[in-house]
Image: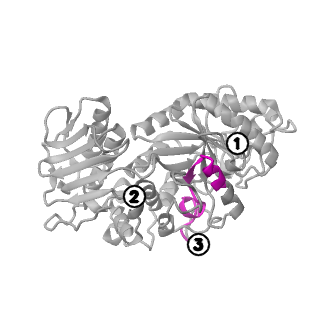
Amino acid sequence: MKQHPSTPGLPGSLPRLDHVVPAPASVAPSETPYQITRSTHIVVDDSPETRRTGEYLARILRPSTGYRLPVTTHGADGIRLRLAEGPFGAEGYRLDSGQGGVTVTAAEPAGLFHGVQTLRQLLPAAVEKDTVQPGPWPVAGGTVEDSPRYGWRGAMLDVSRHFFTVDQVKRFIDQLALYKINKLHLHLTDDQGWRIAIDSWPRLATHGGSTEVGGGPGGYYTKAQYEEIVRYAASRYLEVVPEIDLPGHTNAALASYAELNRDGVAPPLYTGTEVGFSSLCVGKEITYDFVDDVIRELAALTPGRYLHIGGDEADSTSHEDYVKFMDRVQPVVAKYGKTAVGWHQLTGATPAKGVLAQYWGLDSTSAEEKAQVVKAAQGGTGLILSPADRVYLDMKYTKDTPLGLSWAGYVEVRRSYDWDPEAYVPGLPAGAVRGVEAPLWTEAIENPGHVEYMAFPRLPGVAELGWSAAGTRDWERYKVRLAAQAERWNALGIEWYRSPEVPWGSDGR
């Protein structure tokens, strides 16, 4: 990021252009801020996408400012959102702020939306509150030019170990959108619960979804509810990537249908946290009827490009059977118009052309396993980097963290940020890394407050790894920018961990 000194004479509470997270590609401050006032309009192009983003911005600003902020296609002053050709790419934008107004320009609607997230961060944090605040509402003057490093910038929410409602997922989506995350990976099925209704196998949800870790009531999404989540995510320019974990992590399915088991006997529902004990029967043809039905119905509900088929910790499946299973299942995903994603164990089988592998290994992962991943990448398999000892958001920050697990070690804020996706797995060919994703498993996470505490402040750093150019990764500068986010989280009512590694100051008390 091209950094410039802050401009003398600006109000002390005015957020700086170079304190945005993720770090923009280029920042050039000026001495003339813009002030949102009672007479400000939000001026949009005459297109549905631009108007939707304008209304979204207005809904954020109206409660705290108390201003009408009409969204209109007429006029030039105020806040202007426009689509125009330019060197922005699919998600990039340019933001110009000065005395006459703020203009966000992008080539595509997603870029315009991301530019609005930057505009939010350039306003005082109190703008995020849902009651009228005293103001004033200055926007720092200058120009931001920006576009992402990677096309995949994701977060995963495990709704299987503990179930989260539609509204709770929507709140998480809003938090992801603030930091320009563009993929929401939903881990919909596991040993402890099946969370999506499948018409052709109804007991998956009604029985398999009837509990969770610790024996709670569980729950599942009807098809209409799942589609509501998908639409809401799309309105924030996030693509939902649903996961059906196969052939292991399947006890909820096996408990729902006896015929899916090797011995034809359904096991009891499971509410513990051990892994690796369950497996579909690779030798039974009904297994593939089941897989075909589930993928067909889920693909029809999912407008996005990807469908995740899991593939990790299939310890009860022999290697030979695992390869046979993946050889049968990957074409099913393609048959229904989706690109398969799998955990990196898929590279031990034969990854189909175009498939993505999600790497969750550790620094200590064996050289043999890393070599297997590198070989697949050399053959064209793209990688999403999710190393557990860096970006698993369910890992404890320290030994004293009241929530989370520690099997991958303790992951403080600096550790989650201070690594390079391109260098994490030695030997990868250029272009193999397609992006990064921060998974949040929920064996020990029971409610939205827990989700927020584990995600913040680590999630913004992972978002920056995915968005910002490699040269911007500097912990000493980043921790200052991160500290400036604390007041915004407070205004949004987000629970967060006050890491001693970050100079929170008065904003983080």
Instruction: Give coordinates of residue 90: x percent, y percent.
Output: 38, 41
The residue where tag 2 is placed is 469
What's the mark number on residue 246? 1
Mark 3 lies on a secondary structure that is loop
Judge the density around disc 2: few (<14), some (14-19), many (≥20) Cα neighbours within 10 Å.
some
Q: Mark 1 touching mark 3, by CB under 8 A?
A: no
Q: Mark 1 touching mark 2, by CB under 8 A?
A: no
Query: Where 426 falls versus 203 (above or below)?
Result: below
- Eye-nearest disc, 1 or 2: 2
The residue where tag 3 is placed is 399
Residue drawn at (25%, 57%), measured in percent from left and top?
124
Q: Which residues are magenta?
A: 373-399
Give amino acid for label 1. Answer: Leu
Residue drawn at (14%, 61%), measured in percent from left and top?
31
Q: Earlier in the sequence, mark 1 or mark 3?
A: 1
Instruction: Give coordinates of residue 290: x percent, y percent.
Output: 72, 31
Judge the density around disc 3: few (<14), some (14-19), many (≥20) Cα neighbours within 10 Å.
few
Give amino acid for label 2. Answer: Ala
Judge the density around disc 1: few (<14), some (14-19), many (≥20) Cα neighbours within 10 Å.
many
Q: Mark 2 touching mark 3, by CB under 8 A?
A: no
Farthest residue to the top: give it: 200
Residue drawn at (15%, 32%), measured in percent from left and top?
74
Instruction: Give coordinates of residue 125: x percent, y percent.
Output: 29, 57
Residue drawn at (26%, 37%), measured in percent from left and top?
84
Mark 2 lies on a secondary structure that is loop
